Amino acid sequence: MQTSEVSLPAEASNTKTKRLTVIDMVRGITILLVVIGHADFTPIVLGDLFRDFRMPLFFMVSGYIFSASKYFHNLKLLIRTRFFSLIVPYVSAGLLAYLIWVILQMIVKGQSWDIVWYKPLLAIVYGTSLEGSLINVPIWFLTCLFVTQIIFCIVMRYIDPYSWQIQLGIMLLLSLSGFLISTVLFLPWNIDVALVAQLFVFIGYKLKEYKLIEKLRTFDLSSIVLLLLFLLTAYFNSYVDMNNRIYGNVLLFYVAGITGSILVIKMTNALTQFKWFARLLTYLGQESLPLLIFHYGIFILVLNFLEQYLFHLHLNWLITTVIAVSGSLLFNLLVQKIPILHFLLNGKRTPVRPRPQALWSRV
């Protein structure tokens, strides 16, 4: 039996559409912050503030769009779906960036290689950066998200009958175990980071379960409290970088990540009234995968080379961001027209069709 949103009352359908639009806009904001961060955003203090909630927000969104009815009793489907949508693009984007990097290294005659040629390949296999040897740095998130969703599905399937308080306690312990593991070693495919992220995914999942996003108000007392908590915890905590397992004080890390993420969601709710801006953010959110895998592995990689060896200058972060974002979007239009590239870099086995207003299949 097929289900369709047309059976929903008009008010319920409009609420759901707005809720999905807000989440896509949040994804657009987050991927934009990722690109800006890799473009050496200044002032640095703001860039560091973005790091406190940027990746936690990505994980929270992944929890929000996770389908319990679809995957709780069909783990194989989740693994197969995420393998094609995350791991295939991960490997392809990693090898593409490696090829570009090798070509650039060969162009610079007389220059020694920054990294031994085989280490970036080992980093791709390991699924995380080994001593900074993953050329396309942002794709670490794809292996991490793959593992994160599998862990979340398995755990939530068994603790779902219990109260949310017990669920929260279990997810907190699971997340802290990932933090403790990361102090000893970095597990392959970012398994330790995936454990750390479970609390964020859980909160996103509960936001959907209790339909809290449509209840959030931008300007109220809770916003002031959240802002103060975020600023205080971000200020007193040290530099944060989940990719490199730098969390600082783990309690401050979680409070800053959660409060900052909820503040962004609140702000995005208010931005929906600005139609053109909302459409732009929605589009960026829908194209978050190609933006993630292309902006650094192709455009910033080449720009850094040109800046260092040809122009001998450093481009402004805004110019770099515009080039990386627009270049990634244009390159992906070409990728979508070539079936084999569409499969390898977008993880899609079907021809590109006109895009509906809300798209949720990618992350």
Image (cartoon, rainbow, N blue to C red):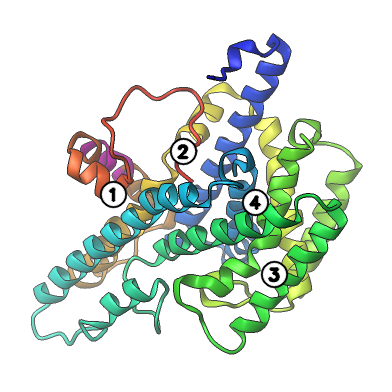
Total marks in image = 4
Residue 187: mark = none
Q: Residue at x 44, y 63 (%)?
A: 143
Percent position of residue 243, x then y: 51, 71
Residue span colored magenta = 327-334
Disc 4 from disc 1: Cα separation: 24 Å
Residue at the disc numbered 4: 60
Left or right of 103? Residue 287 is: right
Vertical comparison of 269 with 6: above or below: below
Please state which of residues 233 and 171 is positioned toward the viewer in this rendering.
171
Say what amino acid the circle numbered 2 marks.
Answer: Ser
Q: Which of pointers 4 and 1 lies earlier in the amino acid sequence? A: 4
**Disc number for residue 361:** 2
Tell me which residue sits at (61%, 24%) in the image. Answer: 274
User: Relative to the observer, which residue lies in front, 359 or 271?
Assistant: 359
Query: Which amino acid, mark 1?
Result: Leu
Residue 175 marker: 3
Identified by mark 4, the residue type is: Met
